[in-house]
């Protein structure tokens, strides 16, 4: 059965106006310098599913619809990426006011901007060269913003000390993660650096590992146990990896992406003890720290747990925690703001980190300003508190509702099983794909869940990412979808997923509805 | 003679509160995972003088002065980096208006913002997901901004066609340069990628080459000929490099950084012919394209020259040109905006480029918006044109004046010789350092011009960067200074440099003033 409506090659984003070689003055063909044969093989190895072929295809369909083409749907819904504003979430007014004031300080005279925003903007600009957002900051970021972040962390962690000189602003969390990995990855052959990552993972990690030619060491999260991290699995993965590389880093994503779980304090303790014992550097991706919805879950920072384990741990385990403006209740992805806190790093290495950061000069100043508002939001005694608090609660309340709704509807579909979305912005349901569909996918040279997701996109306009892009246990299939669309849209979307899934099962199982 | 007022180790930016190892529960010492021994050696090899030890020292002195310490000067003048706003340059009003409107669209209702700015902001927001600067853009950038850039390039190059799908927004030019090098650098041993760079160079290039473990292939600019690029020197460098690596890329900085020269059309033709013949990929750093001051000089884009060389060249030579919001007349460094135009890249490789960009999601949206204003400024028929034009002319006029002033005063000092500052933002004068000072520097384990610059900083508060950080011919010494301080401050600065230089010569030559 050939249902495939487009060739695989059409998935790549090419302009075909260019020739790969051209006539030479002396009659010989001039070869291109940079071809697939000469391209850096580490770049070739990189995969990044969140913006991969399925998203390119979604863009094609969007353009087709715009140009008057017809499909069984009127719009593409991009549930592939945690891009809150693109899904209609409104910016937090106060954050935008502060950044606008920093951008155009003439607005300081405008009575329509609140004083609370003005003093924050003035303070940020005081910290900028020439009092301008247009100057470079120090490479680790604007000093007063670093101090605000340290104060925020101390408050979040109920008094655990935070040194502002350990804080580095970044261009989104991705940039920070890449930078720290760059320090850590070295060695050849069996001394190559092993980087332990959860499976499923956010594919920035696997992409960075490929790009840097490190060894990806998978530890599998326990789907049957709400995607919990199992310490025995960490030991297994570590011991197996030691045979062929040197595992030096463990990456944790908490709350989980794409898995949506929130780790328990006990689990974090176990991870930190393990890292302590095995001399592992800990990278803790905590960008969803404000996105916890399940009433029985709570965010515990790795740093605070480390502190509570006692000075032997707190003074020795090397830990970097990452945060971002892109998630939480602000969803300011386009600002590319973020920070990392670096604990127990060797002082000489820290100087090397500063040097490496300085080559890229500094993170964007608007993103730094946005980060400052997140860590230094309006306080109850400020006039702007009420509106700020309302907006924040409204976003987080809606996300909690959507997390629940997503889990419930998905679990009502035969052949779909979805763990609770305890936190972050994603559901990662397991889907049953009939053997016939698996075979067809293999014949087409693609993963079965890629086939599933491409058909979902073609038939419903819904764009989600195949589980294979994040990693999953063999012979299990998933997709990642965001819970970001509005409640109304999410209801429609989930209904369409249900209908699609049932008809997919019918088509490939040869079963009727009442048999499913 | 021990004049050295601080130890070299105090130059590093360390907090000394952390121990490099800590007591372990079982009594053994727990070693750190990441130490100078285990650090990625390619990171260790990176050097970046523009923000190197001299700048850390300048920061120390600034803090010392702030805390009430005394020095023979009252402030540190940072002429080490092209950071216009930090030196007091005012932002272009129109650019900031557009970015502020994009940031806080409620301002669309404000009568104090011009319609010309509002329609640009509306158009940019139309191109953003959810009409918000807070959403991710497509990884190559917002489509309408890419189109504006292509239109700008066509106009700049008098009709040479530009395809918007060849335009990629970047996080400053540095990010683009790193990304393209990442594609190109591969191979081991004698097939390692050789990257030809000018000497003196902007140290981003050498830093990137170190980080990526490529081979730096130096071609020397001709100081005696106004830092012109000599084609014979290119051939020499290429042939020599072929013995031990595979030269695949040539980087050109025009107008020059740190050298301030503007390349002639003939010279560009020669470079392109050479690249054509030797199958080299061309990276053309044109971030100073708006910074040309010498009346007899003109900016010629590599792309336009390539076009004029005929279709054999224009359809085959792989060329990437870089631009930025940080330089020109806007000086918006903190926005981290920029773009690259990619010509003749193999379509499959281009898809790989898009994939690589997508891992970092997208460049900051405020920087993209700033870039849009630069390529789509007010037109004569618009109300905002007059003010915009005045502000632009005022910045560029002052820069031209300062370029001339810098050259003149420096050349009035015995033992300093400065080529004309034809463009960019820097002077790179050659300085005579007496043999005794050279010996002293060697005894201290530092470059002679580092010693010179550190003493200049200690004695006058002026922070410039030693020529050794950019590369220079053996036994020649230079420093790079920006021409960005205000005319008044620049006059003072240059006077102090003169006095310092003379007393330095006297001290180390044992000569009196009238003998110099």
Image (tube, coloured by chain):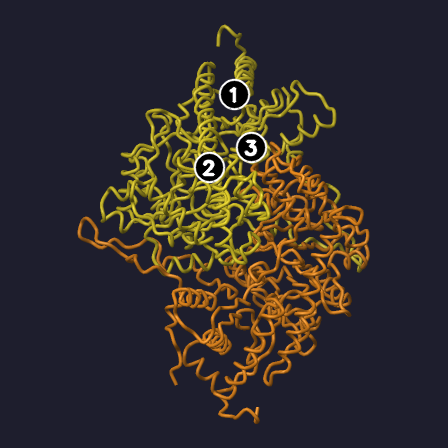
Chain colours: A yellow, B orange
Give the number of the mark in front: 2 or 3: 3
Left or right placement of residue A57 versus residue A187 in this view = right
Classify 10 Å Cα crowding around label 3: few (below 14), some (14-19), many (20 and above). many
Provide the residue designation for mark 1.
Answer: A487
Q: Earlier in the sequence, mark 2 or mark 1?
A: 2
Q: Residue furthest top?
A: A514
Residue A500 is situated, as x and y percent measured from the top left of the image, at 56, 17
A293 w.r.t. B469: above or below = above
Q: Residues within 10 Å of mark 1 (few under 14, many from 20)?
A: some
Image x and y of residue B255, in percent: 68, 64
Front one among A303 and A455: A303
In terms of depth relative to the viewer, which is nearer, B388 or A511?
B388
For mark 2, name the chain.
Answer: A
In the rendered structure, which disc, 3 or 1, sits on the residue that comes first in sequence? 3
Q: Secondary structure at mark 2?
A: loop
Q: Specify whether disc 3 shares its chain with disc 1.
A: yes
Give the chain letter at badge 1: A
Q: Which mark is residue A85?
A: 3
Q: A24 or A296: nearer the eye?
A: A296
Q: Which mark is residue A184?
A: none
| Camera sees residue B284 | no
C-alpha gap between disc 3 and disc 1: 15 Å
Q: Are marks 2 and 3 on the same chain?
A: yes
Q: Name the residue rendered at 39%, 70% in the picture.
A: B69
Chain letter of disc 3 in the image: A
Mark 2 nearby-residue class (10 Å; few <14, some 14–19, many ≥20): many
Judge by depth and name the residue closer to the eye, A26 or B81: B81
Q: CA distance from mark 2 to mark 3?
A: 20 Å
Q: Position of residue A214 (x, y in %)?
A: 44, 48
Residue at numbered disc 2: A202
């Amino acid at each position: 059965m050939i249902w495939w409506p487009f060739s695989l090659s059409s998935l790549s984003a090419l302009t075909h106006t260019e020739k790969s070689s051209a006539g030479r003055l002396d009659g010989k063909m001039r070869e291109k310098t940079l071809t697939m044969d000469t391209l850096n093989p580490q770049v070739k190895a990189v995969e990044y599913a969140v913006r991969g072929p399925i998203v390119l295809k979604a863009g094609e369909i969007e353009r087709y619809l715009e140009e008057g083409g017809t499909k069984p749907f009127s719009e593409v819904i991009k549930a592939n990426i945690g891009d809150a504003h693109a899904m209609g979430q409104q910016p937090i007014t106060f954050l935008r006011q502060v950044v606008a004031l920093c951008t155009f300080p003439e607005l300081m005279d405008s009575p329509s901007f609140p004083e609370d925003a003005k003093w924050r903007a003035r303070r940020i600009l005081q910290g900028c060269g020439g009092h301008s957002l247009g100057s470079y900051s120090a490479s680790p970021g604007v000093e007063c913003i670093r101090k605000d972040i340290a104060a925020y962390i101390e408050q979040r962690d109920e008094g655990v000390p935070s040194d502002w000189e350990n804080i580095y602003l970044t261009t989104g969390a991705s940039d920070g993660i890449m930078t720290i990995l760059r320090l850590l990855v070295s060695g050849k052959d069996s001394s190559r650096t092993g980087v332990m990552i959860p499976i499923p993972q956010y594919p920035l990690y696997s992409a960075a590992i490929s790009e840097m030619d490190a060894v990806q060491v998978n530890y599998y999260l326990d789907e049957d146990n709400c995607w919990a991290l199992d310490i025995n699995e960490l030991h297994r993965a570590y011991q197996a990896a030691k045979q062929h590389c040197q595992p030096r880093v463990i990456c944790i994503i908490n709350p989980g992406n794409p898995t949506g779980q929130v780790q328990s304090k006990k689990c974090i303790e176990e991870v930190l003890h393990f890292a302590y014992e095995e001399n592992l550097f800990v990278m803790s991706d905590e960008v969803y720290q404000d996105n916890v919805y399940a009433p029985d879950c709570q965010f515990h920072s790795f740093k605070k747990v480390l502190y509570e384990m006692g000075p032997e741990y707190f003074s020795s385990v090397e830990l970097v925690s990452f945060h971002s403006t892109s998630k939480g209740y602000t969803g300011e992805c386009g600002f590319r703001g973020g920070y990392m806190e670096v604990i127990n790093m060797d002082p000489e290495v820290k100087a090397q980190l500063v040097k490496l950061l300085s080559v890229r000069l500094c993170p964007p100043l608007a993103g730094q300003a946005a980060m400052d508002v997140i860590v230094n939001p309006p306080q109850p005694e400020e006039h702007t508190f009420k509106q700020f608090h309302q907006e924040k609660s409204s976003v987080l309340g809606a996300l909690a509702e959507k997390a629940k709704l997503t889990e419930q509807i998905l679990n009502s579909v035969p052949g779909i099983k979805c763990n609770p979305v305890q936190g972050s912005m994603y559901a990662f349901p397991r889907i049953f794909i009939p053997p016939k569909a698996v075979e067809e996918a293999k014949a087409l040279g693609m993963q079965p869940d890629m086939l599933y997701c491409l058909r979902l996109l073609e038939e419903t306009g819904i764009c989600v990412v195949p589980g294979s892009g994040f990693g999953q246990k063999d012979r299990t299939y998933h997709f990642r979808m965001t819970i970001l669309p509005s409640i109304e849209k999410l209801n429609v979307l989930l209904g369409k997923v249900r209908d699609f899934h049932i008809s997919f099962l019918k088509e490939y199982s040869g079963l009727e509805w009442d048999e499913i």
